[in-house]
Image: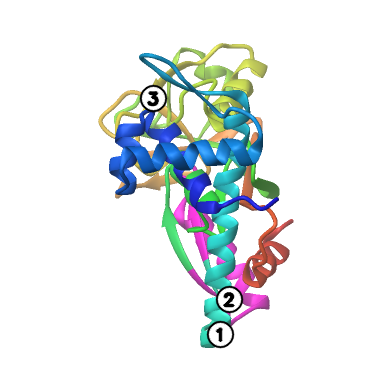
Amino acid sequence: MGLDLHKLHHLVAVAEEGSFTRAAKRLHLSQQALSTSIRALEREVGVALLDRGASTLTVLPAGQALIADARMLHGLARSAVHRARRIGRGEPETLSVGHTPAVTGEEVTTLLARAHRTRPELASRINQRYPHELVEQLLAGDLDLGLCRAMTPVHGLTRSLLTHHRLHVAVAAEHHLADRATVDLAELAEETVMVWGTPGRSGYTDLLVEHCRRAGFEPRLRRNPVQGTPPTTAVLGTDHIAFVTAAPGWVADGRVRVLELRPPHFVPLHALWPQHTTHHAREAFLAATTD
């Protein structure tokens, strides 16, 4: 039995909108046509996918499983079309890379430089993406590769470890630690730590918290109100600290000091990509940049 990708797309839209009316408007379909499409899909699958209650619409477990696979299938289909179109037109293969704010532009540039030493012809497009955007665009086939720290791969994505980076601590020039060159992790027990992700929902934040706990304290956290800010500059105008992977020294025109963290602590740099897709440039990048 073959599944109609259009019907799967309709199911995803209904689940995301939580309403046949809103989903039909989004898809530019009549509500009746959309309902007929979903009913046909349920007959093809052989089980109910949605619970159409009097006041609420609930995605049943079978529907949730099918939606997870549908997102992956749509991404695979888009990637396959893009690849065939590129080959047919004789266009060069370009690696589209997204990275979360936890991975700096300098770190991405360093990885690309390593890849170019073995594949000088490698062409790439680099964009910063928030973690949820990174996942969505990888699954949709809009990105070929994601660079992140400690993100758990969702269904349809695979993850590998590229390397580790050493952690240091950034403080504003006015901070009481700014005249120090080094700091022990245990000394930070009374400091407020600036983070980007919510504990329990961000693998990287949870990893930083675990480092602190192993040093004997529960960190006091503050989520950065300006998402996307480079880690080293997030502390500007605050008395908070931030764990960063930048090298020790003065940065941001002398407005931020990065202190060497003792004892040495390291955080992973991971690569994420869609399963079951073929991309020779990605394979070359991974081979050249994995320690």
x and y percent of residue 277 in the render? Answer: 66, 61
Question: Circle 1: is it few (<14), some (14-19), or many (20+) Cα within 10 Å?
Answer: few
Q: Position of residue 134 (x, y in %)?
A: 48, 47
Q: Residue at coordinates 73% horizontally, 65% vertically from top-left?
A: 287
Does residue 110 appear anywhere in the picture?
Answer: no
Q: Nearer the viewer, residue 77 or 279?
A: 77
Which residue shows up at 33% across the image and 40% down it?
24
- Labels 3, 1: front one: 1
The residue indicated by pointer 3 is 223
Which residue position is annotated with label 2? 84
Distance, label 1 to label 2, CA atoms, is 6 Å
Q: Where is 219 relative to 94, above or below?
A: above
Comparing 240 with 37, the one in front is 37
Chain-order first, disc 3 or disc 1? 1
Q: CA distance from mark 3 to mark 2?
A: 43 Å
Quick check: marks 1 and 2 in contact, CB under 8 Å?
yes
Up the image or down, 113 lies above or below 72; here it is: below
Q: Identity of the amino acid at label 2?
A: Ala
Q: Quadrant of the C terminus?
A: bottom right
Q: Which residues are magenta?
A: 96-124
Hey, what amino acid is under mark 1?
Gly
Residue type at tag 3? Arg
Residue assigned mark 1: 88
Q: Position of residue 148 (x, y in %)?
A: 56, 45
Judged from the image, the secondary structure of the residue bearing numbered disc 2 is helix
Circle nearer the N terminus (3, 2): 2
Say which element carries label 3. strand
* Magenta run includes residue 152: no
Q: Quadrant of residue 173?
A: top left
